[in-house]
Image: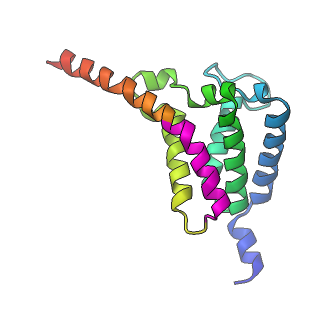
Amino acid sequence: AGSGEGVRACAGWHEAYYCLLMLEKVMAASPSSLIPSESPPSTSASPSPSAMWEAVVSLLLHRHMWVRKAAARVLGAGLANPQVAEGLLAVTAAAQQQQPEMSRAPRIAFSLFLQLDNEAADEVLCGQAVKCLVPVASALYTLEAAFPQQQQQQQQQQQ
């Protein structure tokens, strides 16, 4: 098993890693430019902040640990900023229509739990995952509190 195999197994990790480093710098310099929203995608060539955050969340589960760590740092920076965190963890209109899986919070939480369950995870990655889970858990509590009421209403309507 040569080092060439490892590089091919994680093809594209360099690009993902450096994009995350760039997002870290943008987050530090101008966090307001990364506030996700439900507005329709713009017609510009650049992706929307919501699309960028979706990519960051998906990179939490990348095969290369450097990418995972960088994605966790970017997510942590986003969750530390109240405006970004509000948009990141907001219950979307689709989630309000009885589709809680359309909310980002459950997907973020699941990705963070998978990071904690990874045999290759080190103390730094696990620490960052736990830091990120605190605001996400709060959002999940809010999400769960909203849906039992709607489920009860549906059951009453069916009777």
Q: Nearer the viewer, residue 59 or 112?
A: 112
Q: Is residue 35 above or below residue 124?
A: above
- As rendered, which of 5 and 80 lies closer to the eye? 80
**How many labels were placed on the picture?**
0
Q: Position of residue 41 (x, y in %)?
A: 68, 24
Q: Is residue 19 left or right of residue 89?
A: right
Compared across the picture, whether 7 is left or right of 123 comes to right
Corner quadrant of residue 48: top right
Image location of residue 34, percent across then percent down: 74, 30
Q: Quadrant of the N terminus?
A: bottom right
Question: Left or right: where does residue 96 sit relative to residue 1?
Answer: left
Overall secondary structure of the magenta stretch? helix
- The percent position of residue 123, horizontal first and vertical second, equals 64, 62
Image point (51%, 52%), residue name: 113
> Quadrant of the rendered structure where residue 124 is?
bottom right
Q: 128 above or below 35?
A: below
> Residue placed farthest to the bottom in the image?
1
Queried whether the magenta region covers residue 117, the answer comes back as no
Q: Seen from this angle, which residue lies furthest left?
A: 159
Residue 23, by quadrant, is top right
Residue 130 falls inside the magenta stretch: yes
Rendered residue at 55%/41% (across/down): 134
Q: Which residues are magenta?
A: 121-137
* As drawn, 154 above or below 31: above
Q: Residue sitting at 72 percent across and 43 percent down?
A: 74
Residue at the image position 64 percent from the left and 19 percent from the top: 39
x and y, in percent, of residue 139 in the image: 50, 32
Left or right: 99 as drawn, with respect to 92 = left
